[in-house]
Amino acid sequence: MYQVLKRDGICASFEIGKISAAITKAFEALEKQYHPSVIDLLALRVTAHFESRIQNGLISVEDIQDSVEAVLSE
C-alpha cells in the first residue's frame, strides 16, 4: 500500500475510510441524503482519480483533497 504525506511532513498509511468520512461530512454539511454504499463508491472513485499522482508510493494529502473535490463536483 502507499503512504500519505501529511501537511506537517509526516507520512501515514493510506486509509480509504478517511476519504469516506470526509465525503460523509460533506453530504451532511449540505444536508443531502446518502447511502453508505454510495459513499464507498465515491471513495473508490477518488482513489482512481488521484492514482496517477502517486509517486514512489507516496501521495500528498492535498492531492487527495483535490481529488475529493473533483469527484464530488462531477
Image (cartoon, rainbow, N blue to C red):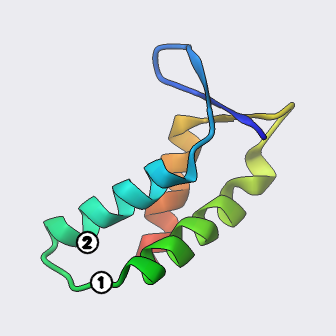
Identify the residue under disc 1: 34
Q: Which of the 4 image quarters holds residue 25? A: bottom left
The quarter of the rendered structure image containing the N terminus is: top right
Mark 2: amino acid: Phe
Q: Which of the 4 image quarters holds residue 63? A: top right
Establish if 68 lies above or below 4.
Answer: below
At horizontal 75% and vertical 37% (from top left) the residue drawn is 2
Residue 21: image location, x then y, percent: 36, 56
Residue 20: image location, x then y, percent: 44, 60
Mark 1: amino acid: Tyr
Q: CA distance from mark 1 to mark 2?
A: 7 Å
User: Which mark, by number, is residue 27?
Assistant: 2
For label 2, the crowd category at 10 Å Cα-Cα, with few meaning under 14, some 14 to 19 and many 20 or more, is some
At horizontal 59% and vertical 63% (from top left) the residue drawn is 46
Residue 19: image location, x then y, percent: 47, 54
15 displayed left or right of 29:
right
Viewer-nearest residue: 25 or 54: 25
Q: Which of the 4 image quarters holds residue 3? A: top right
Disc 1 element: loop
Viewer-nearest residue: 51 or 38: 38
For label 1, the crowd category at 10 Å Cα-Cα, with few meaning under 14, some 14 to 19 and many 20 or more, is few
**Sooner in the amino-acid sequence: mark 1 or mark 2:** 2
- Tell me whether the residue at label 1 lies in contact with that at label 2, contact meaning CB atoms closer than 8 angstroms: yes
Q: Nearer the viewer, mark 1 or mark 2?
A: 1
Viewer-nearest residue: 33 or 9: 33
